[in-house]
Image (cartoon, rainbow, N blue to C red):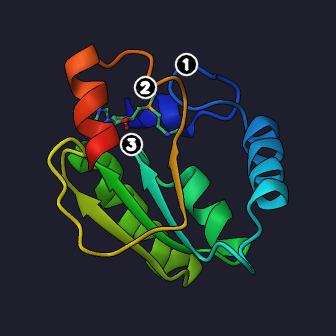
């Protein structure tokens, strides 16, 4: 799965890099980091969006229950010297006291949740 995320020519797990750039650009326009600083990326995978959000000035927290993806994402923060917090966790069971200005859940993940899980997620 990690290989699929990281292959820039394949958009099975993560969309292609140009699409990521456009998406992040769009989000920065509707919710600029100057006003909406704290961003939570649910199902962040290996952090390809999180790194871009960090570069765009957000204070980023990423959550994913893929151990490999989170391990890779953490390695990338060291490599890029980016300041992103990652949690290896099921986002349906998070119980954060922190507040976030923007919460992303990217690549149709909401659509595949059951109605019960959608309600759990919306209440978190
Ligand atoms: C289709 S991938 C998208 C990854 C990333 N958002 C992207 O577009 O590059 C879905 C991701 O959500 C994660 N995921 C799915 N359900 C989850 C859950 N309940 N808690 C945490 N992560 C979850 C998967 O491990 C996977 O990394």
Is residue 32 positioned above or below 116 on the image? Answer: below
Mark 2 highlights which residue?
Answer: 110
Q: What residue is rendered at 27% in x and 30% in y?
A: 119
Mark found first going from the N terminus, 2 or 1: 1
Inspect this view and state whether residue 114 appears: no
Beta carbon at label 3 within 8 Å of ligand 1: yes
Query: For numbered disc 1, what is the local secondary structure?
Result: loop
Marks 1 and 3 sit apart, C-alpha to C-alpha, by 15 Å
Is residue 65 positioned above or below 58 on the image? Answer: above
From the viewer's perspective, is the residue at label 2 or at label 1 nearer?
Answer: 2
Query: For numbered disc 2, what is the local secondary structure?
Result: loop
**Percent of width and height locating residue 117:** 23, 26
Is residue 24 positioned above or below 14 on the image? Answer: below
Quick one: label 2, few (<14), some, or many (20+) residues within 10 Å? Answer: few
Mark 3 highlights which residue?
Answer: 43
- Residue 12's label in the rendered image is 1
Q: Is residue 96 left or right of residue 7?
A: left
Mark found first going from the N terminus, 2 or 3: 3
**Percent of width and height locating residue 91:** 25, 46
From the viewer's perspective, is the residue at label 2 or at label 3 nearer?
Answer: 2
Marks 2 and 1 sit apart, C-alpha to C-alpha, by 16 Å
Is residue 115 positioned above or below 99 on the image? Answer: above
């Amino acid at each position: 799965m990690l290989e699929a995320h990281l292959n820039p020519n394949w958009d099975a797990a993560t969309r292609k890099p140009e699409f990521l750039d456009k998406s992040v650009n769009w989000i920065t326009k509707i919710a600029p980091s100057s006003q909406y600083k704290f961003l939570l990326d649910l199902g962040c995978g290996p952090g390809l969006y999180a790194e871009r959000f960090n570069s765009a000035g957000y204070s980023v927290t990423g959550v994913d229950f893929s151990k490999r993806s989170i391990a890779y994402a953490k390695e990338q923060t060291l490599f890029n010297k980016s300041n992103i917090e990652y949690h290896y966790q099921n986002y349906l069971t998070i119980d954060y006291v922190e507040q976030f200005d923007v919460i992303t859940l990217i690549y149709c993940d909401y659509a595949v949740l059951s109605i019960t899980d959608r309600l759990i997620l919306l209440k978190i």
